[in-house]
Amino acid sequence: MKSISKISVSVILIAIVLVISVAPALAATPSIDYVAFGDSVASGVRGGISEPGSDFGYTDLIAANLKAARALGSFNKDFCVSGITAELLASNTAVLNDTTSSGYKLVKNAEIATLDIGGNDLLAPIYAYVKTLPAGSLPDKAKIKEILTAIGDSVNDGVTAPCIEKNIETILQNILNANPNIKIYVMGYYNPLPVAAAITDVDLDSPLKEFNVYIQKAISDVAAVNSGASITYIDTMTAMAADSSTYLVMTDIHPTVEGYKVIAAEFWKQIGLLVPSTVTATPTKSSVLVNSKTVAFDAYNIGGNNYFKLRDIAMALSGSTKQFGVGWDGKSITLSSGSVYTSVGGELSVSGNTADVSAVKTASSVYLDGKLLSLTAYNINGNNYFKLRDLGSAINFGIGWDSATSTISIDTTQGYAA
C-alpha cells in the first residue's frame, strides 16, 4: 500500500479512552475496469491493526464482488494513499490531464471509479496536537475537547469546507477530463471518532452531516458543467452509526473488517446495478457431506462458486453447535445464531433438475443477530440461494473440498477458514 508520512491517531485515541470450486457458469457479463481514489479508508487501513499488511478495505471488497460476478476486468489503487488530503489528491490527479501519462490511460479505459477524500483535511488539528505531545505522555481531555469542537466548527467557518469542496471538484473534473463516460461513486463520511466525541461531550455528527452536504454540492457543481456525467453520492454515515462499536475500533479512526463490509455494501447498492441481474446457474454435481454424513441438496454453481438454499443449510445444521434460525419480515431476512431452526416445509427436497437455469440477484437484506451481512445471493425458481462460503464465514462453520472425489464437506465442529 502506498503511504505518506503521517501521525497515527490510534495510540492517542486509546489514551483518550483511558483518560476518560467447480466448473464456472456460462453467463456472459461485462468487463468492468475499476480505479479507486482516496485516503487510508480507500487504501484499506483497518482499525486496530497496524498499517503494514492491512491493505484490505471497501475498495477491495467492491472489486471482489465484481470478480465474483465475473464482471471485473481490472482493479487499480495507485491513487489511494494513506494520509492524503483533498488538496494533495487534487494535485496528484492533475496527471490525468496529460494524455501521455499512465494515469490518464488507466482512467481513460476504466468504467467506474470510487472516491473518498476530505477526512484528513478535517482531522488536521488533532494530528497537529499529537505532534506536540512528548513521547509516552497522555493527552489533555480539555485540549481534546477543544480540538474536536474546533474540527466541528471548521465545517462552518466559511473556509475549510469550501476549500475541500473545491479540491473535490478539481479531482472529479480531472477524472472526467480523462474519461467523460466513467461512472464515479463518491463516499460521504461517517463519524470516525464516536467515543472521543461522547467522552468529551462534543457533537461531531451534526457538522459531519454538514460536511457531507459540501461533498454533495461538489458533485452537483461538477455534474452541472459536464453534460451526461455520472457521479453518485454514497451515504455511509447512517449504516456505520447503526453499530459503531462493531464497525469501528473505539480507539481508531479506521473501520474494522466488518465496517469495511458495511461501506462496501452501501457502494454495491449502486455499483451492483451495472452487473446483469440474470446469470446462468448450473446444477452442482458434487456430493455433499455434513459432519461426514451424505446429505442431498438442490445446489447450483454460479461463477465457480456453489450456492445453496438458505433454509436447506439451516435445516442441515439444526441441532449442531452452529445451528441458526431464519426469519423474514417482508423486507429482510433475519438470522439468529444458536437458535433452533423452525421448518416451513420443503427443506432439503431435491428437484432432480440437471439443466442450466436462470438466476436473478436477490435484493433482500440479510441480518445476523441484528448486524447487516454482505452476502452474494440469487433467486432461482422462487428460492434464495446463497454462496456457501459466505454462509460458512458468517455462521463460522468449516467448509472443505476434495477434488479427487468431487466432494464438498461441511463441518460444524470446525470454524470457517478462507
Image (cartoon, rainbow, N blue to C red):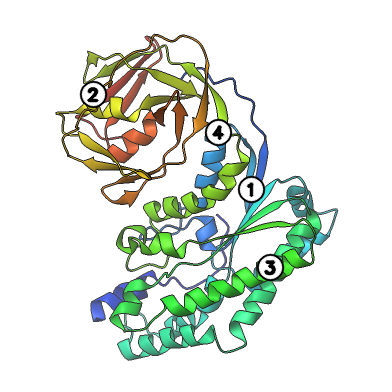
Query: Do residues under tags 3 and 4 come within 8 Å of each other at their CB atoms?
Result: no
- The location of residue 179, given as percent across then percent down, is 78, 53
- Answer with mark 1 or mark 3, whichever residue precedes in sequence: 1
Numbered label attached to residue 344: none
Query: Do residues under tags 2 and 1 come within 8 Å of each other at their CB atoms?
Result: no
Question: Disc 1 and disc 3: Cα gap in Å?
Answer: 26 Å
Q: Residue at x 42, y 26 (%)?
A: 382
Mark 1 Cα-neighbour bin, 10 Å: few <14, some 14–19, many ≥20: some
Q: Is residue 360 left or right of residue 214?
A: left
The residue tagged 1 is 76
57 lies above or below 238: above
- Answer with mark 2 or mark 1, whichever residue precedes in sequence: 1
The residue tagged 2 is 316
Q: Please name the amino acid that badge 1 sits on.
A: Asn
- The location of residue 260, given as percent across then percent down, is 44, 54
Q: Is residue 390 visible?
A: yes
Question: Disc 4 and disc 2: Cα gap in Å?
Answer: 27 Å
